């Protein structure tokens, strides 16, 4: 019974995490962040944008 609950909770965690990455972050951005953490890529500079009216 405990393994069934643990398996269900793990599946739920993976599904929600995958959905979050798909909708909010993007797999390419996540992969780039992993490469930066591992030291095989450089961090990209993101400049802010303020619209002028």
Image: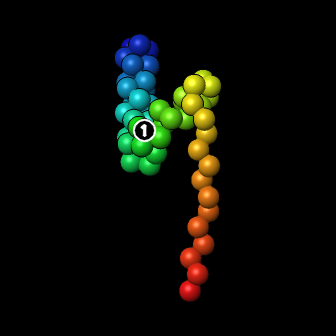
- Please state which of residues 24 and 51 is positioned toward the viewer in this rendering: 51
Residue 6 lies, with reference to residue 34, above or below; the image says: above
Q: Where is residue 21 in the image (x, y as percent from the top left)?
A: 43, 40
Question: Relative to the observer, which residue lies in front, 37 or 10?
Answer: 37
Residue 20 visible somewhere in the drawing: no
Q: What is the x, y in percent for residue 16?
A: 41, 37
The C terminus sits in image quarter: bottom right
**On the image, which quarter does residue 10 sit in?**
top left
Q: Residues within 10 Å of mark 1 (few under 14, many from 20)?
A: few
Which quadrant would the N terminus be assigned to in this image? Answer: top left
Q: In which quarter of the image is residue 3?
A: top left
* Viewer-proximal residue among 22 and 11: 22
- Colour style of the rendered protein structure: rainbow
**So how many labels did they put on this image?**
1
Query: Please, which residue is most extreme toward the bottom here?
Result: 53
Pinpoint residue 41: horizontal percent, then vertical percent.
Answer: 57, 31
Q: For this view, does 20 lie left or right of residue 43?
A: left
SS at circle 1: helix
Examine the rendered structure and indicate whether residue 41 appears above or below residue 22. above
Q: In this view, does 27 lie above or below 49?
A: above
User: Label 1 belongs to which residue?
Assistant: 28
Q: Image quadrant of residue 17? A: top left
Q: Between 1 and 7, which is closer to the camera in this rendering?
A: 7
Q: Can residue 48 be seen in this view?
A: yes
Give the residue at x 47% y 40%: 29
What residue appears at the point 39 percent right and 19 percent down from the top-left corner?
A: 7
């Amino acid at each position: 019974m405990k393994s069934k609950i643990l398996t269900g909770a793990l599946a739920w965690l993976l599904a929600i995490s995958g959905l979050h990455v798909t909708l909010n972050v993007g797999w390419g951005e996540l992969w780039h962040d992993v490469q930066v953490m591992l030291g095989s890529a450089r961090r990209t500079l993101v400049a802010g944008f303020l619209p002028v009216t």
